[in-house]
Amino acid sequence: MNAPVDLAPFKVLIHERCGLGFASDGDDAKLRQAIMARAQCLHLHADAYFLRLGASNGEFQELVNLLTINETYFFREPEQLRFVIDRVLPRFVARPGQPSPIRILSAGCSSGEEPYSLAIALQEKYGTAAAEMFSIHAGDIDSAMLDKARRAIFSEFSFRGVAPDIRQRYFEKSASGYALAASMRQRVQFRLLNLLQPERPLSLTNFDVILFRNVSIYFDAATRKRIQQHLSEVLRPDGLLFTGTAETLANDLNVFELIEEDGMFYFAKGKPPLPSTLSRRAALHRPPPPPPTPTPPPPLRRAPVAAAPAVSAQQRPTSIATSQVNTAPIRATAIDSDALRRLVAGHHYEPALQQLDAALAITPHNPALLLLKATVLLERGQFSGAEALAHSVLSQDHWSIDANFLLGQAARSQQRVDEAIRCFKQAAYAHHACWPAHYYLADLYRQRGDAQLARRAYHAVLQLLNDSSADHGIRHLPLALPTGEIRKLCERHLASLPAGRK
Ligand SMILES: C[S@@+](CC[C@H](N)C(=O)[O-])C[C@H]1O[C@@H](n2cnc3c(N)ncnc32)[C@H](O)[C@@H]1O
């Protein structure tokens, strides 16, 4: 199949059937590669392959399996999981007339780490009674991922951030990886699930809690809304929906009511069960007590590829250009750090790492490349590697805003609050208008119960956001900066922090 493939009809069909969109060069490259691989496998030209795709559900499944982004790991966003296990589910357990068992759905479960994390955490909390008390279901559109989930053998990669004793107790090391104990495997029922299709088998209805985390980032607002309407139909009247913490405001689409409780956000279909001391309204505005564990701040999302921060020609790190994002290994002469940034922003970590390593072999001290590689390692929970790269940038430029900011993110992810504060302060000293650093500082102060400093930092963010000439100064890290959402969050937090001087 050598003629160029017209991607447009493929995009329309795929978007219509399962919601996936292709907004960037990197997405296009991935789609083109997948189409060519499947068409070659069937000895078809692109046009004939398109017809086959429309006519065969089996072939559509094969193609979709090549297109989904399945990044996941055990106990991802641990603060939110802890909140679900320790705060939310006990309310359902205590609710009079609670139909047993409590039903939980992991929607977009990928290879199963999310629902298995729930099973393990519930076993830790309730012992073997958890098997009777909770019924855990999980679904994904990717049938290959579901096969992997059912096999339940995981690589080292799935365990970033998992306490060694948990791995020891629930997994057995084998030649092919870490096999989850059969007793936990049996706790989760997996099913093929297309969130965009309204029909639901009975086993996928009547849920009390749905985790819909790190899935909606791949959909446009109209698709997110359609999916939310489907999810609402399979939730019980007082059921709750959790999105990833960075996705909250993008999912506030008037289908569910957004509730904030101690810095945690979730969506309610009707009247959710709340602790007896807390009314629903109060849940939205209650000043947070010093939290037992740090709460997650980061609505600063990785940039959708189309929204990668604009960088002026002078600010661009030296690059020998190719304009396309290419997922093939890089050649010695083709280093394009903007293209690499788009690859990282689009979560294409594997090809990004390959290309970054190849590029770093040519220019080992290039700060843009070092920081992009650090970002990938950070995303993968490889904190010491990420930190080492950021330090090597600092050894060239002590005031690098990007490097200090990245070190702040790494420290925050590892719950090293004081160190995170020090790094974000450093970024803000280097460049006062770096409002993302002020934003993280505000959240860290709030977590520490330091209301006055938190208020001051939130006000600084709002002031900088109101100044259209303020430039945050982060040049290389592919952050999406959804300023509207950040502004709303600052206002919410300011309304709920105890009043005080600025
Ligand atoms: C990045 S993973 C998230 C996994 C897990 N929820 C987590 O937070 O770690 C996103 C998953 O959503 C699935 N997905 C994408 N579109 C879907 C759809 N229309 N219906 C069901 N699952 C979908 C993908 O196959 C992929 O496995």
Image (spheres, rainbow, N blue to C red):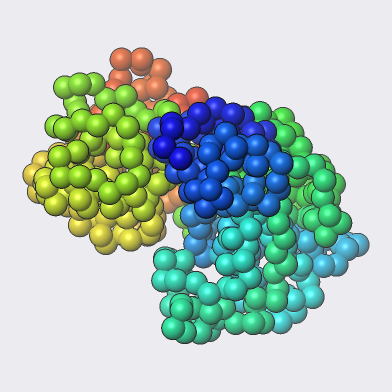
Question: In the drawing, does residue 45 fall left or right of residue 51?
Answer: left
Task: Tell me where residue 219 sits by quadrant.
Answer: top right
For residue 359, above or below residue 170: above
Q: Nearer the viewer, residue 461 or 48?
A: 48
Count of residue discs? 0
Give the position of the C terminus as an image quadrant. Answer: top left
Please tell me which residue is depicted at 44% across the width and 83% down the height of the picture: 175
Tell me: 314 left or right of 458.
left
* Towards the viewer: 386 or 20: 20
Residue name at image x 20 percent, y 45 percent: 331
The residue nearer to you, when weighing 9 against 459, is 9
Q: Quadrant of residue 98?
A: bottom right
Judging depth in this view, the residue of 259 and 349 nearest the camera is 349
Residue 153, position in %: x, y? 53, 74
How far from the left and from the top, in percent, is residue 206?
Answer: 84, 54
Position of residue 264 measured from the top left corner of the image (x, y, whole percent): 58, 47
The image shows residue 122, relative to residue 260, as above or below, that is below
Does residue 82 show up?
no
Q: Position of residue 427 (x, y in %)?
A: 24, 38
Q: Is residue 196 left or right of residue 395?
A: right
The answer to whether any part of residue 356 appears in the image is yes
Residue at image location 65% in from the left, 54% down from the top = 140
Which residue is drawn at the image coordinates 82% and 50% (left, top)? 200
The residue most toward the top is 468
